[in-house]
Every structure is written in C-alpha cells, then in structure tokens.
Amino acid sequence: MYDKNDWMWKGQVMQGKIVKGISGFYYVHVVESGVYECRAKGIFRKQNRKPLVGDDVILDVIDEAERTGNITELLPRKNELIRPAVSNVDQALIIFAAAKPKPHFNLLDRFLVMMEYQQIPVVICFNKCDLITEDERREIADIYASCGQRLLFTSAKEEIGMEELREIIRNKTTAVAGPSGVGKSSLVNLLSPGAQMETGEISRKIERGRHTTRHSELIHVGGASYIMDTPGFSSLYIPGVEKEDLGKFYPEFAQYEPYCRFQGCAHMSEPDCGVKQALCEGKIHSTRYENYCMLYEELKSMNKY
C-alpha cells in the first residue's frame, strides 16, 4: 500500500485519481505527470468492485509516451455516492445566481436535502452578487442563516469573493451543483485557468472514436484540489428520502423539535408544534418552512403510488 499523499513516481508504478470513466476506460490524473488512459484489472470484476470517478488508485504505466496504463489497486474510499456514482467527495458547492435568474429557493433546498441525506458538507454560493443591493444580500442571507451551511457571495464578472472560494476548495474534492445560467463555468475558469487544457487532453483521447457520452468528471485545479462536474446533481428528484424523515434534513428544526407535543411530529397540522412556534417567532425563516411543506406534500403524494 502506498501512502495516500505520495504522488511521486515509483518506477513505472504511480498513484492518481480517476477524473473520468467511460465505457471501461478510466482517465487517471497524476499530479505533476498528467492524465493516463487506463483499463482496470479483471480482478475487480471478480471482486464485484467497480472503479468510480473520484477513486484514488495505483496504476502501472504501459506506455509513457501514449499515457496509457492499467489500474491495479483501488485505495480505500472515504464515501461513495449512488446518484451520481462518484467517490471521495469532501464537500458540495451549490451555486445559484443572486439575480438574473432570480434564485429558485425551492430548488436550492432540494439540493441541500440531497446533500444532507448523503452526509456531504455544503457551501452555498450566490454568484452575480454585483447585481443586487446590500439589503437584498441580507434578505438572502437571512433565509439560510440558521441552516448550518456556509454561505458565500461571489461575482465572477467583478472577481468578488474569489480568494475565499479558492481557500474553501483548497486540497478538497468539491462537487459543483446548480442550475444553468448561474455562472458555474465562469467561476470554474477563474479558479483554474489551466483547467480547460487538462479537460482538453482527456477530450482528445475520448474523441478517438471510443466514447462520447457525458458523465461525471473531475477538473484538477491545482495540488490536491479538484472540482467535480456532476450532471446527476441537476435532478429535482430526492432519492431515498421518506416524508417522515424530511425534517431531519432541515438542521434548524432540531433544537425546536423537543418542544413538539407529539413524538414524530411532522410539523404540518399538529397542535403544539415546537417548529411551528419557532416559525411564528421568526427563529425559522418562512421560506425554508414553506419549501419544507411543499417537499413533504410531494413525498406524501409519491408514496401513494
């Protein structure tokens, strides 16, 4: 077993991270060496183990000039997500626009529930903050002040908040989520101007005629820092969450639930509900509670079929 932080050559044996996987080919990034197109050893199939984007692996180099190799070992995973199928995610960066388009808070809450369910820490990023007033910024911040997640305002156009964002992603694998039109690509390009070069290197290999399907992909942004482009995070569907458990994924509810009269209170129509009392007192934001109610009813309706 090789030390996980040892990225140096060991003869023709190297350690890297899978940044893309398509049709049985895995593209492994080795810091200071580049991207290698690899196959996985057959023993993984016998063990019913499949390499995932985000996996740290050991590879044997077959041809250094062609950058090809074989994956011989999968190193231990810290976590594994099912949808999308990726591993070793340290945090999620959920990006919405502060304006143009106006933030869709219900969709944002769906992302937060999905990440809470999968136990992934979240940073909420509102881009295009140059388009809103200070009062509007405070209104947005107030909604998520007690949700337990870090909140950041950025502007890719004005390069506001970029140093803080660079520090947030440093030496982490960060999954990026959010709707289109919010400036995700602009932020990624600012974080790593050279990212397009490495992405292009993978694309040239893929375009040799073998594979073209879009899958989850890691973008190397320096050192041990990666950003994960995850198309699966664009889904509105919240997999695996039951309506009875939804409240667990709203962290600001927890301190008020002991004051509910009924154990297992749904915080909907029950009398003497601690969460609804906190709502009335302004301790829980009405936008968050309204989104909770909408998601609860949606899950309730789904469970009927």
Image: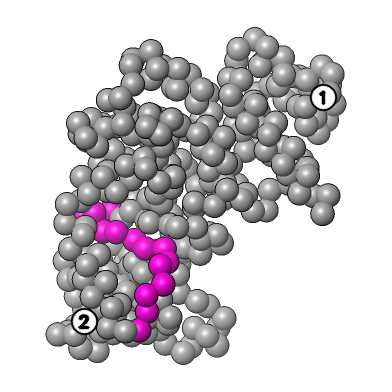
* Magenta stretch encompasses residue 214: yes
Q: Is residue 244 left or right of residue 94?
A: right
Position above or below: 145 against 157: above
Q: Amino acid at mark 1?
A: Ser
Position above or below: 218 against 12: above
Q: Position of residue 230 (x, y in %)?
A: 43, 57
Q: Residue drawn 33% across and 34% down?
A: 127
Q: Is residue 91 visible?
A: no
Q: Position of residue 235 (x, y in %)?
A: 54, 52
Q: Amino acid at mark 2?
A: Arg
Separation (CA) of disc 1 from disc 2: 62 Å
Residue denoted by label 2: 67
Answer whether labels 1 and 2 touch (C-beta < 8 Å): no
* Residue bounds of the magenta highlight: 210-225
* Magenta stretch encompasses residue 256: no
Q: Position of residue 139 (x, y in %)?
A: 45, 17
Q: Residue drawn 72% across and 41% down?
A: 298
Report the mark closest to the observer, 1 or 2: 1
Q: Secondary structure at mark 2?
A: loop
Residue denoted by label 1: 269
Q: Splitting the image into 4 quarters, where does residue 262 fall?
A: top right
Q: Is residue 138 left or right of residue 11?
A: right
Mark before the other along the chain sequence, 1 or 2 = 2
The dot on residue 176 is none
Q: Is residue 52 left or right of residue 280?
A: left
Q: Splitting the image into 4 quarters, where does residue 288 fall?
A: top right
